[in-house]
Image (cartoon, helix red, strand yellow):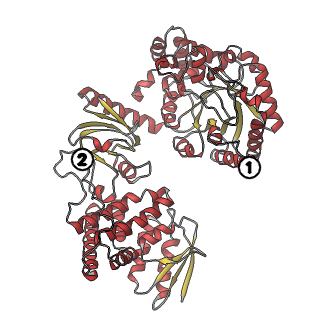
Amino acid sequence: MERMTGAGVSPGAGYGPAYLLGAAVPEPAAGSRHGGDVVAEVARVEAAVERVAAELEARGEAAGGDAQDVLVAQALIARDPVLSAEVGELINAGTAAERAVYEAFMRYNDILAEIGGYLGQRVADLEDIRDRVIAELTGRPMPGLPEEAEKPYVLVAHDLAPADTALLSKDIVAAFITEQGGPTSHTAILARAMGVPAVVACAGATSIVNGTLVLVDGTTGTVGLLPSEDEVAMTIQAAEARDTALATATGPGATADGWPVAMLANIGGPRDLAAALEYGAEGVGLYRTEFLFLDRDQAPSEEEQEQAYREILSSFPGGPVVVRVLDAGGDKPLGFLPPTENEPNPALGERGVRILRIFPDVMVGQLQALARAAQDASAQVQVMAPMVATPEEAAWFVGACRAAGLRSAGIMIEVPAAALRAGDLAPIVDFFSIGTNDLAQYAFAADREVGALTAFQDPWQPVLLDLVAMAASAGVPCGVCGEACSDPALACVLVGLGVTSLSMGAPALPWVRAALARHTLDQCRAAAVAARAESTAEAARTAARAHLLGLAELGL
Amino acid sequence: MAERKVIVESAVGLHARPAATFVQTAAKAPIDITVAKPGGAPVSAKSILSILALDVRNGEVIVIHADGDGADQVLDELAAIVSAP
C-alpha cells in the first residue's frame, strides 16, 4: 500500500473511505466595491452574521458539553461589535460586504497568529467563521461535512474548525487526517476527546481522492492508502495492544526486575524541549550545541550561550543533561573553524575534538558559559567531547572541563579505536556515550551520507554490538545516544550489553520504556549474548527477539 | 467613573470559557466597559476578539473600567468571573 506520513496526535488505528471536508470558500477579490448603498450593504452583513451565529448556537445546543462552549464562543466572535464596526468602516469606504468581512477578519487572524501558541491555533476557528459569513453573503454552499459519505469515514481536511466537528462521533468518523495543525490544534484536542485516531501535519493529505480506503495509525502518524484486509486487521489489532501498553508505561526507565536505565532525549535546542517533556524524558542524553553556532561568522558570545544553556538545564530539574561540545568539521563545516588543509575525506579529517584542539578558545568559551549556567541549576550537567580516539585527547578534554569548573566530563565513543581500547580511556573520564551512527561508519569504512552504503548503518551488525560491549564493560557509566536506541528490541540488547542510559528522539521514549519494562535484566543479557553469537545483522536481530517475547504485546 | 483591578485566577487566563462568559456578561450591560492591562490601551469588554488579542494569562492583572448607571454592579460581576479559579 502507498503511504503518507504526518504527526500522530491521537492514538489508535482507524480504517474507512476518505472524505474531504467541504471545499474552502474562495477569497473575495481584493478591491471589490459595492454599488453605493452603504446602508443596504451593512444590513446584508448584519443579516448574514446573525444567520451564521444562530446556526452555530443551534449546533452547540444539539451537541451539548464542551462542544457547546466552543460553539457559543464562535457565535460571540461572529457577533463581535468591534469586528462589525471595522466591517462597517470598510463598507463606508466603498468596499463590498464580502471583501470587508474578509479584511476585517484577516486583521485578527494576523494578531492571533503573531501571539502564537494556543491563540495561533485558534486561527482555523476564525477562518471558519469568516468563510461561513462569506458563504452566506455570496450564496455559496457552506463549508461542511460530506453528507452522503458511507460511515464511518476518514475525514480529511486542510484543517478542522469546531463548527465542522461538533456533531461528529466515533460512529461517524473512523479517523481524522489534516494537512495543517499541531499537537494542540483543535483537531488534535477533539480527536483525543472523542477517542478517534488522528494524524495532523500530513503533507498531501487533501490530494487523497474521495472514497479511497485509507488506514490511519494515530500513534505512528502513518496513513496507508488502499491497504489489504490483512494489513487492516494487523494494524488495528496491533494498535489496540500497543496503545494499552504505551499508556501504562510511565515513570523512570527500568527493566521488569527494577534495573534502572535512564530514558533520555536527544535535543538540538529549546524547540525540542516540549516533545522531550511530553514523552517523559528523564533528562537529555545528547544536547547537540551545533545549532548555536551554525550560520554565523564567529562563535556566539559566552553570555548568549549561557542563556541558551540555562533554558535547557531549567527544564530538567534534578535530571542529567549531557551537553556535547561543538561537533564541527566532517559533514558540519563551520566558516570560523576551517580545517588546516583541503580535506579529500572530511569524515576522516579534522573534526570533533580534533578541530577543537586547533581552536581551543571556542571550546573554552563554551565550557565557561556552561559552567556558569550550571552553577544555579539543579540539573546534573555532564559535558562530552565528540570523535575522541586516544587517551591523550581524552585527558586534554577532561583537563579543560576541570579548569572551567565542570564536574562531570566524558567522551563520545564513535571511533573504533576508542571502543577497542575503552579500558585505557575509562580511568581518565567520568562517562562514555556511544554514537552508534558514526561508530558504524568508521567500523565499516562506509560513509553514512552515501545512500548506496546504508546497509552498513544497520545497528544490529554483530561487530557493532561487540564494540558497544567493550565500551559498556570498561567500568564507567556508558550511555548510547544514536539511532540504535529508538529500536525497542535493540534497546533491550544494549541494556544487556551493559549500557546504563539510552538517549533518543523523544517520540521513541514510550516504546523503549515499555519494551524494557517487559523484560528482566537477565532476558536482556540473554538476548545480547544470542545476538553476538550470530554473524549477520539479520540473524542477530532474529536471535535476540527469541529472548524478547514481551515485544509481541507491543505489536513489535 | 468606576474601576476594578483584578488578578486573573482562571488557569487558562482570559481565554476559552472564562472569556466567553466575561464578554456575554459585559454585553448585557447598556454602558461602555473596557479592559486593559496596567498601562496598556483599553479595549471593549464586549468584544471577544479584542479580549483574546489582549492575551491575558493566569496570574496577570487587568483593569476593568465602566461609566454610567449600574457600573459598580456589572464591574463586581465581571471581577467575580476573572477571579474564579
Give the amino acid type for the residue marked by disc 1 in the picture.
Answer: Glu
Q: Residue at x 62, y 47 (%)?
A: A315
Chain letter belonging to callout 1: A
Q: Is residue A47 visible?
A: yes
Pointer 2 chain: A
Q: Which mark is residue A303?
A: 1
Structural crowding at the residue carrying mark 1, measured as other residues with C-alpha within 10 Å and reported as few (<14), some (14–19) or many (≥20):
some
Instruction: Residue at 40% x, 24% y: name it.
Output: A552
Against A489, is A370 above or below? below
**Vertical position of residue B61 compared to residue A469: above or below:** below
Please identify the quadrant where the N terminus of chain A is shown: top left
Which image quarter holds the C terminus of chain A? top left
Furthest toward the left, the residue is A148
Q: Which residue is mark 2?
A: A171
Observer-nearest of A474 and A64: A474
Find residue A252 and name its label. none
Q: Residue furthest bottom?
A: B69
- Residue at the (42%, 62%) spot, across then down: A109
